[in-house]
Image (cartoon, helix red, strand yellow):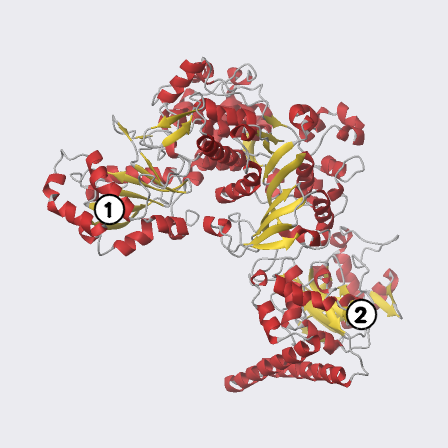
Amino acid sequence: MGINELVEKYKLDRETYLKPTYNETQLRNDFIDPLLKCLGWDVDNERGKTQFLRDVIQEEYIEVEDESTKKNPDYTLRINGTRKLFVEVKKPSVNILKSSKAAFQTRRYGWSANLGISILTNFEHLIIYDCRFKPDSSDNEHVARYIVFSYEEYEQAIEEINSLISCDAANSGALDELFNVDVREGESFDEYFLQQIESWREKLAETAIRNSTELNEEDVNYIIQRLLNRIIFLRICEDRTIEKYETIKSVKNYDKLKELFHKSDRKFNSGLFDFIEDALSLRVNIDADVLIAIFNELYFPQSPYDFSVVDPTILSQIYERFLGRKITIEAGRTFNIIEAPEVSASSGVVPTPKIIVEQIVKDTLSPLVEGKSFEELSELKIVDICCGSGTFLISAFDFLLEKKMEKVIEEGIEDPDLFYEVDGEGLTFTLKGKRNILENNLYGVDINPYAVEVTEFSLLLKLLEGEDEATVNNFIQQHSDKILPSLKSNIKCGNSLVDSKFYDFMPDALENDELLFNVKPFDWDEEFAGIMANGGFDAIVGNPPYVRIQNMQKYSSEETKYYQSLDSQYTVAKKATIDKYFVFIQRAIELLNPTGLLGYIVPHKFFLTTGGKELRKFITENHQISKIIHFGVTQVFPERSTYTAILILQSSRMDEFEFKKVSKISAKALSSEEHTRKYRTEKYNSDPWVFLSPETEEVFDRFEGDEYEKLGNITDITVGLQTSADKIYIFVPEGESENVFTFTYKGKEYEIEKSICKPAIYDLSFGAFESIEGNAQMIFPYKIEGEEAILIDEEALEGDYPLAWEYLVEHKEALERRSLQGSDPKWYQFGRSQSLVKFHNAEKLVWSVLAMRPPYVLDTKNLLFTGGGNGPYYGLLNKSDYSLLYFLGILSHPVIESMVKSGASEFRGSYYSHGKQFIEKLPIKKIDFANADEVEKYEKILRIVRNLINTTAQFNAEKNSSRKKVLDRKLGTLFNQLIGVINSLYQISHEEFVTVMNDEMLSVAIGEDE
């Protein structure tokens, strides 16, 4: 039935439909089901999808707390099992245009489920509510109302309605883009709930510390974490009708709450309510008024939540951020809640977005389940070795549920103990069937004991998703067992990276309990003996911590020394520039069985950098790349500048692997085969991992011939001077006389002798072919004698340069804090001795390391600059018979620049690195000076480059806009001539040039990383 026929049907008997006796069930059958079908939703599951993937779920349970009856959201509309919106139906006699109660109810569903929109309709009208705004019981029906359609408008407005709520709009990503839950003016569920549980932690800490003076810091953190877990767990069970509604709200003091927990332990088991191991919770005393205030905030009208639709993954991610802070007890039994220092150093906890988690789990587990039977799937062993709050394990649980159900249907298995038929929805797993997955398939380890608690909590909540009082009671009757399993054998606390070899490295550790409490050595062969005896785990998924070596040394120095010692097996950690995720990748690979797969999201910088060489070597020698999803500069983690890729590795040999570069985070972009390319495994080793189209690669490979020389072989590519105190040594003159410069530093005016200064560039931006002038002066306490820079001794410095001496002495304390080189370093020398002589009376090319296009300029004025491996500047000195202008022309060519871009570290803001490691292997065409054609092209390059330099200077100086336009056109013509002659010299055809310029692997705007 089309939309016009549906509207006509409604018009014909509208008076009947508007009568109170015409109910919601009738309306749904007569009009809402057909309406959703018109919008492309498979209401009746005609495609025969399993319950996990079907488009439409009807009557997902939710309790309406301000009414005496139960109420369900009538439809949940999904794409590939992921909820996209709710549809709430009222009968036509209800005036939904003026019903604040119906509006609040609809918004509450969507907000609690972290959806962008939800729909309220009685067919007379269809109202879309923006659920990105936190609902409040005092809101009127107009708040967050996005648009209203009358039934009379449906036919005319069908295109607009389709663009908003059709199955196609949801499937294409248009719905998510239009109502992006990450871009909102209102407060999201996760932000609001995080604020609430943090405020509850603060209230509970205050009363616990005040009333229980024997508790230490660790005790308080443990008690409050468990208490919140228990309260939230029971409150969620109420909304799922597993517990009686308002059970917690009826509790009036802590003694009664403990009684409730004892009762819950008898019912649920699992250790969540166990007081045998948790004797501390029995001893603490919590004020009744604090508990009552917290409980009230969990119920209508103070609460905007509907916990029955809250995604366990969202709760898990909220807890992950919650775990980044801890209670500290100060003198006088006062307390603070602070971010853990190691967390703060990493810019705080940022959970992995659900869409990324699901993609990693799918890409890692899909090859493992292919071709396996139901029984074989039941034997899979999946672990997250830094499990945090359990997000990846929740996703793995969902994945296995779906795949096992497919096998049940495919194999025709009948086992009422594990699954049963649901009217209109097909087969679903029983509670026991779901328990089997938790107990037999999923494992986790984390060094944080509170994270282990939360992972168990998250998985148990996931287990009870979709359950209600009837299914739970049925399980108890059939199995004479408590509802929840214990996960103590699956989820464990320990250091995944440090085992008993640590005692060989540090024998005294056995006498140092505080050290062991921090390091927490963990032997996989003992803790998971059966799995390791069978060869290891089938799959490891997760997001390992990204911690640079500096922070590792600061916050876990003993561990770091162990990783880098000969006592540990970590070959990836033996270099100075490592990150903790390097070690996690090696450990994960070692824990896999011979057919296992690893799925991580990690920074992609190691693909290219010198510091990543050992990790690239370990991966390619011990495992195989299966798939890479490269995000370039697209930010996966909100409010965090981290440049990442999904990395899937497998043990078994593969000739090829998949690579895809993604510039937009959406389900469609991640799952689409478009832009996916295959690369030969054999080409990837410890060398930088570069991913190009085969056509571009063919062009670049041609430059490996004997007629080309590597740039680094015929030039000296060098860093700048390294003062280690640039702000003291380098200044911008504010005035000058015959013999001195004047400048201001830290609010004080100084004079410095000109004779101890050299012109420099400092924080100066410039473009290709520009003529640069020094914009600063550098205090240079050295004398150049031949090929040696000799530090001026203190007596001579004080006698010959008294102003400079006085200035340096005034800042002696700051200069002495530097790390200086040499057997007898002087406090006023530069931090490093590199490049002190190199730039003396030598022409050179200079460039900014971070740039978005060829940044090279010719310096003929002996300018100094600073810079280490990461810049800000680099220089190039000539060691050949070629002109520097020749190098400048070649380095400015777009194809040569593409070679830089293809291998460079990607950074945000359209910038990428032009560091030495990315340009030293660039091909320079050898010129046969006996070959007239080559000499002619060589000399033409020099003429064009000189003209480009001169014309660029003219352009920058010209004030007349008309003349400036002429010069701009001239520059364009000259540059095209330069491209043409170099194309001819390098034998690059027009088609090849266009191919390289249009290579999508090079087309993503890239820029700065640190």
Seen in the picture, residue 643 relative to 512 is either above or below; the reply is below
The answer to whether residue 761 is seen in the rendering is no
Please name the residue shown 67% across and 34% down the image: 591
Sequence-earlier tag: 2 or 1: 1
- How many labels were placed on the picture? 2
Q: Amino acid at mark 1?
A: Leu
How far across and down, in percent of the image, does residue 761 sit? 69, 69
The answer to whether residue 181 is left or right of residue 535 is left
Tell me: residue 469, above or below residue 808.
Answer: above
> Which part of the image, by quadrant, shows the C terminus?
bottom right
Q: What residue is shown with label 2?
A: 714
Report the residue at 59% width, 83% height from top: 973
Q: Which residue is mark 1?
A: 126
**Mark 2: amino acid:** Ile
Left-right relation of 451 to 133 = right
**What is the number of the mark on residue 758?**
none
The residue nearer to you, when weighing 449 against 173, is 173
The local crowd at label 2, few if under 14, some if 14 to 19, many if 20 or more residues have their Cα within 10 Å, is some
Q: Regarding mark 1 in the picture, which secondary structure is present there?
A: strand
Return the residue nearer the eye: 201 or 154.
154
Q: State the image coordinates of residue 988 (x, y, percent, origin top left).
A: 65, 74
Answer yes or no: do the residues labelled 2 and 1 have beta carbons within 8 Å? no
Between marks 2 and 1, how big is the CA–CA gap? 73 Å
